[in-house]
Amino acid sequence: MFLELVNALAVSGIAFLLYPALKRHNEAFAIGYFGSRLLESAILIVSLIAPLLLLPLSKEYITAAEAAGRFSLTTIANTAVDAHFMLFELAMVVLGLGSLLFCSILYRSKLVPRWLSVIGFIGYAGLLSSSCLAIAGHDIGAVLYIPGALFEIVLPIWLMVKGLHFRH
């Protein structure tokens, strides 16, 4: 859970770091991307409340004497787990939408090679689709995340080695 919090905070940090560079190429999309990452971060932080509810519920479950009380606590615990899952998927929807804006800026501005931007488009469209399907109750697993995972591995390496290609 600590790593989930670190991730949520890092998401905001990425938005703050990229905004100045993206704003030079498309201010409206840069603001959209920035806002989506802040919203994603907020949703991820709120989603951390649900697992924390499991601790007091488990203590109550142990001390509950009758079966009806245990059943109620189990139902509440399952709801908390489901809420965590749904909030995470909602955060992924927001990430997908905002990152499509991000990839659009990358593609149009040629800050990185276009092939990399295209992989990002495909990956975030897959993430968006997969998360929407999961929220609708049709969890297809992580198969649609593969191009996005490739983009999220290659892009940072590219940025560390080559940086952004600014044309003046």
Image (cartoon, grey):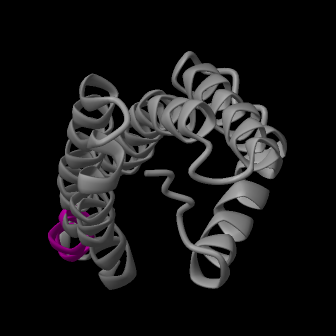
Q: Nearer the viewer, residue 114 or 154?
A: 114
**Eyeballing the image, is 165 above or below 55?**
above
Q: Kindly report the secondary structure that dominates the magenta region of the rendered protein.
A: helix
Q: Position of residue 20 (x, y in %)?
A: 24, 54
- Which residue is at 27% across, 65% downward? 17
Q: Nearer the viewer, residue 122 or 88?
A: 122
Q: Quadrant of residue 12?
A: bottom left
Q: Position of residue 103 (x, y in %)?
A: 56, 37
Q: Is 24 situated left or right of 103 in this image?
A: left
- Which residue is at 47% across, 39% downward? 102
Which stretch did the figure color magenta?
A: 53-60
Viewer can see residue 96: yes
**Eyeballing the image, is 80 above or below 127?**
below
Q: Is 63 situated left or right of 160 in this image?
A: left
Viewer can see residue 73: no
- Which residue is at 78% across, 59% downward? 150
